[in-house]
Amino acid sequence: MSFSGPSIGSGGSTARRAFEFGRTYVLRPKGKHQATIVWLHGLGDNGGSWSQIFETLPLPNIKWICPTAPTRPISLFGGFPSTAWFDVADLSEDGPDDMEGMDAAAGHVANLLSTEPADIKLAIGGFSMGAATSLYSATCFSSGKYGNGDPYPANLSAVVGFSGWLPGAKTLSNRIASDATNRGASLPILLCHGTADDVVQYKFGEKSVQKLSSCGFNDVTFKSYRGLGHYTNPQEIDDFCNWLTSKLNLDGK
């Protein structure tokens, strides 16, 4: 599957790089379908690893869509190719943002959600770089448009990020301020981060929460896990399940 950026899907004519996305794994709900969540893996991973985890969760009302990112040269790896939602050169606040790549990734996710029934709640989540893409999608939803100005189509009910960071933070205030109706004010967001994360530092999780809150996101929950590295654990998964059940009003049947 290829997708060349939001402008293609919204009728624009601007030429963009084409991104070849990998396999998408889909888990159908075991009970009444009430919500669909697109979950995005981390750098170098694929959708299959997370779909195996979700298969075991006590969340029968959720349909899970786990896509696989394109394989592309990564600046952080000196140009060595890896599956990634966008290019990344430096995991720091001052690192350059690949806005074109992030727009393409957010557009791909919105496209995956576009065929869901109107009465189904839509959510996006992810781990590490997948969490960054999810949070970027939240900012697109809030402002009503992608970074390039094209309209953002998905109506989100929740966003989740494990061990991630907020990309585009330097320009976020301006993007949100340019739109009079901040749809992100009531968007539930869950951020989880381990204090011993040696890949995406814990402070980036904290700063992401601070930035989102300062930009008008009023329903942000931050969960901290002492001693947890750049991975998940049962407590985080339990908190995740409970939060989704509450925020999406799932009946568990």
Image (cartoon, rainbow, N blue to C red):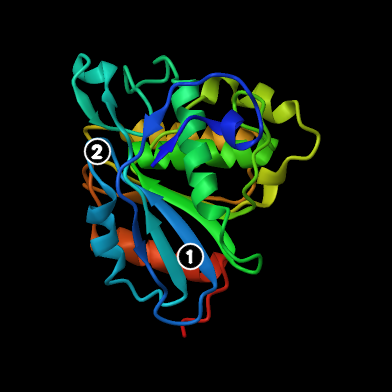
Name the image quarter holding residue 43: top left
Looking at the image, residue 215 lies above or below residue 26 = above
Kindly tell me whether residue 192 is visible in this rendering. no
User: Relative to the observer, which residue lies in front, 96 or 16?
Assistant: 16
Amino acid residing under circle 1: Leu
Q: Which residue is mark 2?
A: 197
In the picture, the quarter occupied by the N terminus is: top left
- What x and y, as percent, mark residue 133? 44, 37
Return the residue nearer the eye: 108 or 211.
108
Secondary structure of the residue carrying tag 2 is: loop
Residue 59 appears in the rendering = yes
10 Å crowding of disc 2: few (<14), some (14-19), many (20+) = some
Query: How far apart are labels 1 and 2 at the CA level?
Result: 24 Å
Left or right relative to 4: residue 212: right
Q: Secondary structure at mark 1?
A: helix
10 Å neighbourhood of mark 1: few (<14), some, or many (≥20)?
many
Residue at the disc numbered 1: 244
User: Looking at the image, how many numbered discs can be counted on the residues?
Assistant: 2
In depth, the one of 220 and 68 nearer the eye is 68
Give the residue type at disc 2. Asp
Q: Nearer the viewer, mark 1 or mark 2?
A: 1
Q: Residue at x 47, y 85 (%)?
A: 253
